[in-house]
Image (spheres, grey):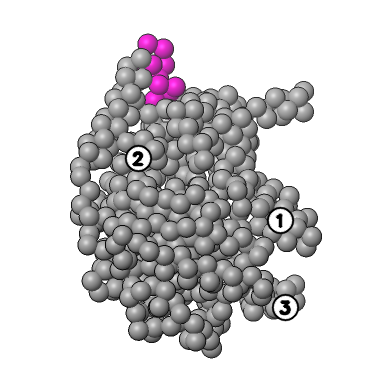
Amino acid sequence: MILRARLVSLIWILPGLVAATGQAPLNLWWLALMAWGLALYAISRAASWKQAAWFGWLVGVGYIGGTHFWIVAPFYVDAEAYAWMAPFALAGMVGGLALFFAAAYGAAFALGRSQGMRLVALAPCLILAEFLRATLFTGFPWAQIGSLWLNHPLMQLAAWIGVPGVGLLTLLALALPLAAPGSRAWPALAVSTALLLGGSWIGAQRLAAPVALSETQIRIVQPNAPQHLKWRPDMAPVFFQRLLDLSAAPADTPPDVVIWPETALAWRLDIAEEIFPLIADAAGGAEVIFGAQRLDEQGYYNSLAVLQPDATISHVYDKHHLVPFGEYIPLASLLAATGLMPDAERRGYASGPGARVLDLGAAGRILPLICYEAIFARDVAAAPERPDWIVQITNDAWFGNSAMPYQHLDQTRLRAIEQGLPVARAANTGVSALIDPYGRILASHPLNEQGVIDAVLPAALAPTIYARLGNWPVWVLLLTLVGGLVLVRRTRGH
């Protein structure tokens, strides 16, 4: 009987899996919304906190599996050597990240004395779990619940309450009708509908405002260098020449800034001075932002550099939020000391000192983000001053034709909404894009094609509430909700 019950309970994987359709490339917010309603309902079928945690873990397996399946792609770039690791990496990520869902469901069950209270408690518990997922072990806030609204006006509320706040509003709107007993369900549904429609109206009003343009003309270059060819000695000159040719291509209005992707150069920055004049000539008087690796006495860095028209480097930014296991080995010193991985400390990149704003003069001040850094709202908020625009350079070629490049693009759009800043995104194989301060894509270049985007940079908006306060309003609301649930439980317990 126990085995049969466990097998039947596997059905709770399905709501999580269907909820994944709210993320790119499908972006089916309406289907994801219904799926999250079913996912919340799962807690009402649990008889204990342990069973609730089990149901939550299953929901998490479906959701994380449906949104993160692309994690296996890098292992097939050199399939002969690494393909065997792919199933273990997928199982580890899915099973591990699903534990945050398990914790949320278990905690919500413990907080509520009734099914209705548990349903309401699950909304803040899931958002608290997302905060933990975004923070622990350097964090991984990919495919947050609130981001299902990205192509809907409701997402504009992120300018006030961020993605976590939008997620909390969504889950509360779903939980209230499910939690209300009998005749109170309809009034609760009316309140939930009003919340979502009101948020949508506010978002639509925000989107109706005109977008001003700056005086900066930019060119975003997408060379389309497949990962399995990118570093080959015979192909590196081919891709470099492609970058030069695309940069030098005629334009109706000559660019002020040309942007190349992450690690665009196959040569280290510290020994590449001989090719700087070639890049400057191709840019025709524009500043060039490009990615390259560099080496100094502290180690290797994944860097972004700004090349001036006189072929000199004016700025260098080193990536500081590195990808665990992809760009560095966590606990490297411990692994080296124990002998489990003697060379762990020599593997990967060194971390840069942190967020910086680079002054490009007439082109304004930019906040550089390299690849992974764009998924962290806190990395953008860590800028020492407000920039005029964001530049993200990335190399998503590791993930081929999977959903990852589209999901990564969507993460960048969320940062634009939160901060009210335009974003220029240069991706090696795509998707490169120019994003306005409302998160809308003004121009883009398709995946796996070479080409350029020529456009005038939109102007920044005034600092948003979220840019000023961050997640503090959401934290206050979360703590108020959880505190209220604890108080009600203790009061009724007596």
- What range is drawn magenta here? 175-185
Measured in 3D between alpha carbons, the distance from the residue under mark 1 to the one under mark 2, in whole angstroms, is 35 Å
Residue 331 to residue 198: above or below: below
What residue is at 49 percent from the left and 49 percent from the top? 446
* Front position among marks 3 and 1: 1
Quick one: label 3 or label 1, which is nearer the N terminus? Answer: 1
Lower sequence index among marks 1 and 2 = 1
* Labels 3 and 1 touching (C-beta < 8 A): no
Q: Which residue is located at x 59 percent, y 27 percent?
A: 46
Residue 43, x across and y down, in percent: 54, 29
Q: Are marks 2 and 3 in contact (CB under 8 Å)?
A: no
- Is residue 105 shown above or below 190? below
Give the numbered dot on residue 342: 3
Residue drawn at x 29%, y 73% as measured from the top left: 360
Rendered position, 1 above or below 482: above
Mark 2 lies on a secondary structure that is: helix
Outermost residue toward the top?
183
Would residue 250 be found to the left or right of residue 140 on screen? Answer: left
* Secondary element at image label 1: helix
Q: Separation of disc 3 and disc 1 at Cα?
A: 26 Å
Q: CA distance from mark 2 to mark 3?
A: 47 Å
Q: Nearer the viewer, residue 146 or 478?
A: 146
Q: Nearer the viewer, residue 303 or 157?
A: 303
Q: Which residue position is annotated with label 2?
A: 155
- Vertical side of 82 occupied by 39: above or below: above
Q: Can you identify the residue that label 1 sits on?
A: 76
Q: Which amino acid type is shown beneath numbered disc 3?
A: Pro
Which residue lies at the image location 22% right of the left edge and 48% below the top edge?
Answer: 211
Q: Residues within 10 Å of mark 1 (few under 14, many from 20)?
A: some
Q: Earlier in the sequence, mark 2 or mark 3?
A: 2
Amino acid of disc 1: Tyr
